[in-house]
Image (cartoon, helix red, strand yellow):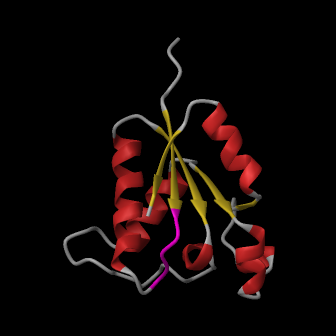
């Protein structure tokens, strides 16, 4: 059985930056292409997984809604990791974040790279 190719998308942009919608769109495309997609959120990218944050955001009118794109990632059980210091500096506790989010440091990202994951940073 062939192992799926892995990609990690490092998202640094938050709710006010259209480049974030590009990152989530790339993640959705990766899922549709059969890649094993993981997301690593840092800086203001952490804001996307605060409960309720993505519900009404629509940064790019040509893309699906942010809600649709993020729910696609969640529904496909993709790994979503959050930088603990980036979360803490915003005052977020684990209870503030949507379910299934992992608060992990960069060694989790490095492990995926060691396992052959490609990386995309936005």
* Residue 62 pos. (x, y %): 19, 71
Q: List x then y, in percent, for residue 64.
A: 29, 68
Q: Nearer the viewer, residue 36 or 115?
A: 115
SS majority, magenta: loop
Indicate whether residue 76 is drawn in magenta.
no
For the point 36% across and 54% down, the residue is 26
Please provide the residue range marked out in magenta. 11-15
The percent coordinates of residue 40 (x first, y second) are 60, 58
Q: Quadrant of the C terminus?
A: bottom left
In this rendering, position of residue 63 left or right of residue 28: left
Which quadrant of the figure has residue 90? bottom right
Left or right of 18 on screen, residue 116: right
Q: In terms of depth relative to the viewer, which is nearer, 73 or 6?
A: 6
71 vs 112: above or below: below
Residue 73, above or below 61 = above
Q: Give coordinates of residue 89: x percent, y percent.
A: 75, 85
Q: Residue at x 72, y 55 (%)?
A: 106
Q: Is residue 13 magenta?
A: yes
């Amino acid at each position: 059985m062939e192992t799926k190719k892995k990609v990690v998308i490092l998202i640094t942009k938050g709710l006010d930056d259209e480049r974030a919608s590009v990152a989530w769109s790339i993640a959705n495309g990766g899922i549709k292409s059969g890649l094993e997609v993981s997301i690593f959120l840092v800086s203001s990218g952490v804001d996307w997984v605060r409960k309720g944050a993505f519900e009404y955001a629509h940064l790019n009118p040509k893309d699906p809604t942010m809600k649709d794109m993020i729910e696609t990632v969640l529904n496909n059980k993709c790994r979503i990791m959050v930088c603990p210091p980036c979360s803490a500096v915003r005052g977020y506790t684990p209870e503030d974040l949507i379910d299934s989010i992992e608060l992990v440091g960069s060694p989790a990202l490095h492990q995926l790279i060691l396992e052959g994951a490609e990386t995309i940073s936005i």
